[in-house]
Image: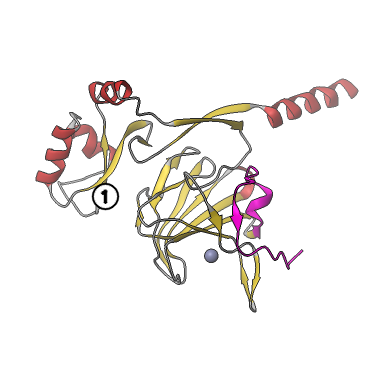
């Protein structure tokens, strides 16, 4: 019986410290459904064909990746896959994604280069603010902080355009005020994968990402989960809920 517990403990501790390699999407190389490419706007079949020619990608694959049925072009953005030749071209220009090594249970920052925090978790006047506000120029990539299943993509009161991801162990993350939501409910995303473009939709006074980490729907302090960033400027530091 004792040995059984030791084995369990060993399994648990190795899983706690297991490392994973994470590719961080940027404005040139992005990933969707295990395919590399880029999210671009297209308003018609002709525009999609032109994009597939530009990136020498397979038009059938583009239709399949984006779940386009009966030639219905209804969305603003589509994922355009890169051909191997185009990827080689990027490689020759030294254009690549950043590689992050982190613990598989570790959340990552949902922006490429967060510079400041304009609000933390806690009471703002008399209203509880359930996450972090990260100012970011509109149109910049919003990244999945942890791998998981997209359970919401839409427009919510106050939150504006929002993506919600469900993770292991009853954690969810919310990404709000986006200008464009890219991924769709039912998609599975990897940590570091682009899910939206930042914006100022909903109850927002300027371009920023509102980011929440919840467990069983209880908002937690993202700063307790994200890797330390000492150079980050925190405008509002009052942690008045603890
Ligand atoms: Zn906020």
Quarter placement of the C terminus:
bottom right
Vertical relation: 22 (above or below) 133: above
Residue at the far left: name it: 46
Q: Is residue 135 left or right of residue 53?
A: right
Q: In this view, does 37 lie above or below 212?
A: above
Q: Which of 47 and 14 is in front in this view?
A: 47
Q: Name the side, left or right, on which 163 lies relative to 235.
A: left
Which residue has dot 1 on it?
A: 77
- x, y percentage for residue 66? 27, 42
- Residue sitting at x 26%, y 30%: 82
Residue 221 in picture, x, y percent from top left: 66, 56
Colouring scheme, one of rainbow, by chain, secondary structure, one colour: secondary structure
Give the position of the N terminus as an image quadrant: top right
Q: State which region is magenta.
A: 219-242
Tell whether position 201 is magenta.
no
Q: How crowded is mark 1: few (under 14 residues within 10 Å), some or many (20 or more)?
A: some
Query: Where is 218 relative to 205, above or below?
Result: above
Hey, which residue is sitting farthest right in the picture? 2
Secondary structure beneath label 1: strand
Q: Quadrant of residue 181?
A: bottom left
Residue 222 rendering spot, x and y as whole percentages = 63, 53
Name the spot of residue 186 as percent of width and height, x first. 41, 46
Residue at the outermost bottom position: 126
Most frequent secondary structure within the magenta stretch? loop
Residue drawn at the location 61% of the way across and 64% of the way down: 130
Residue 238 within the magenta-colored segment of the rendering: yes
């Amino acid at each position: 019986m004792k040995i059984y517990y030791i084995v369990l403990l060993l399994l648990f501790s190795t899983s706690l410290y297991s490392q994973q390699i994470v590719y961080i999407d940027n404005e040139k190389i992005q990933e969707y459904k295990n395919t590399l490419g880029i999210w671009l706007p297209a308003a018609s079949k002709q525009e999609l064909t032109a994009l597939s020619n530009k990136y020498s990608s397979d038009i059938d694959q583009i239709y399949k990746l984006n779940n386009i049925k009966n030639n219905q072009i209804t969305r603003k953005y589509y994922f355009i896959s890169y051909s191997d030749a185009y990827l080689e071209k990027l490689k020759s220009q030294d254009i690549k994604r950043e590689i992050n090594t982190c613990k598989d249970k570790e959340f990552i920052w949902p922006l490429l280069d967060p510079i400041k925090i304009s609000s933390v978790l806690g009471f703002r006047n008399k209203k509880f603010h359930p996450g972090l506000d990260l100012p970011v120029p509109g149109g910049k990539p919003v990244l999945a902080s942890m791998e998981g299943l997209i359970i919401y993509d839409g427009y919510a009161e106050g939150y504006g355009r929002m993506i919600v991801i469900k993770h292991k162990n009853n954690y969810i993350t919310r990404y709000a005020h986006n200008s464009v939501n890219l991924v769709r409910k039912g998609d599975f995303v990897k940590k570091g994968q682009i899910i939206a473009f930042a914006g100022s939709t909903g109850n927002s006074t300027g371009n920023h990402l509102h980011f929440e980490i919840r467990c069983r729907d209880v908002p937690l302090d993202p700063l307790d989960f994200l890797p330390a960033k000492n150079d980050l400027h925190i405008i509002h530091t009052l942690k008045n809920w603890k």
